[in-house]
Image: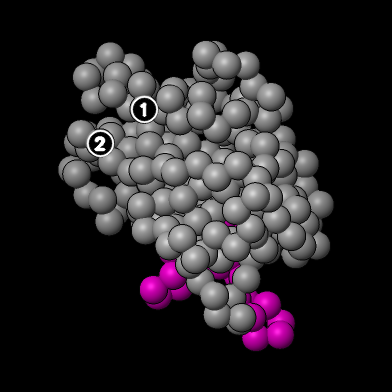
């Protein structure tokens, strides 16, 4: 799935969710209309929960802890916050054969490749979305989530990789609807890897090149509301 003219932008600091969502929807429409290049946009959000199209009300365990945003992406509840690298992926799948399964597999390979650069063996699990790692006590923990939406065959939303977020913040939800006590969440830091976000971004870029192809670095989007 080699890509051409894909832009790669990194926003500093924390970016408010609603302006980011508005920008994504606008950019996806412009890509579909042939008026903008494709974009991979890296950022961090302030602490918040988002509800995907399959979210169940009972899985929001602490509704007053952080803001909760309804969103059109696939999946259930997830947490975003500082120390978690979010990447919004806006690509035109019409140019890639409209193969959604291959697109998701490429996203998985991207995340697995990024984890591998820190010596972490991550992988997918049957019936569970995202990228997981085995723990020594028999548990399996999720290190990265995937939740995308397509409109006119252009993707938006994307992935969230746990670099060093506050893992306790995940206790306010049933992450991705998975309540089995053998399955939890983890991060690079939890696995013993203290990694600066800028260094993780290098790994993410290298893994993207392997999974998708080259990108072109551009300035981050200017939003209607300034980043927090």
SS for callout 2: strand
Look at the image and say whether residue 44 sits in the magenta stretch. no
Q: Which residue occupies the extreme bottom position in the image?
A: 138
**Rendered location of residue 18, percent (x, y):** 51, 29
The answer to whether residue 39 is above or below residue 187 is: above
Q: Which mark is residue 25?
A: 1
Residue 63 to residue 220: above or below:
below
From the top left corner, tell me how far across and down residue 163 is, in percent.
70, 50
Q: Which residues are magenta?
A: 122-144
Image quadrant where residue 226 sits: top right
Q: CA distance from mark 1 to mark 2?
A: 9 Å
Can the viewer see residue 58 in this picture? yes
Classify mark 2: residues with Cα within 10 Å, few (<14), some (14-19) or many (20+): few
Asked whether the beta carbons under mark 1 and mark 2 sit within 8 Å of each other, the answer is yes
Q: Which residue is mark 2?
A: 151
Q: Which mark is residue 95?
A: none
Of residues 145 and 208, the one nearer the viewer is 145
| Marker count (numbered) | 2
As helix, strand or loop, the secondary structure at mark 1 comes to: helix
Observer-nearest residue: 206 or 76? 76
């Amino acid at each position: 799935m080699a890509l051409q003219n894909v832009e790669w932008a990194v926003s500093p600091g924390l970016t408010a969710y609603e302006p980011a969502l508005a920008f994504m929807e606008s950019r996806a429409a412009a890509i579909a209309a042939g008026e903008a290049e494709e974009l991979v946009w890296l950022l961090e959000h302030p602490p918040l929960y988002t509800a995907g199209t399959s979210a169940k009300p009972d899985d929001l365990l602490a509704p007053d802890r952080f803001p909760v945003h309804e969103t059109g992406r696939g999946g259930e509840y997830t947490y975003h916050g500082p120390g978690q690298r979010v990447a919004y992926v806006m690509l035109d799948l019409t140019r890639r054969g409209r193969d959604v399964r291959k697109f998701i597999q490429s996203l998985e390979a991207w995340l697995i490749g990024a984890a591998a650069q820190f010596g972490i063996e991550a992988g997918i699990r049957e019936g569970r979305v995202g990228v997981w790692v085995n723990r020594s006590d028999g548990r399996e923990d999720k290190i990265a989530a995937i939740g995308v939406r397509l409109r006119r065959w252009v993707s938006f939303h994307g992935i969230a990789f746990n670099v060093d977020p506050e893992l306790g913040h995940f206790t306010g939800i049933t992450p991705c609807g998975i309540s089995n006590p053998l399955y939890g969440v983890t991060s690079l830091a939890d696995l013993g890897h203290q990694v600066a976000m800028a260094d993780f971004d290098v790994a993410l870029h290298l893994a993207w090149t392997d999974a998708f192809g080259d990108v072109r670095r551009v300035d981050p989007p200017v939003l209607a509301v300034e980043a927090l």
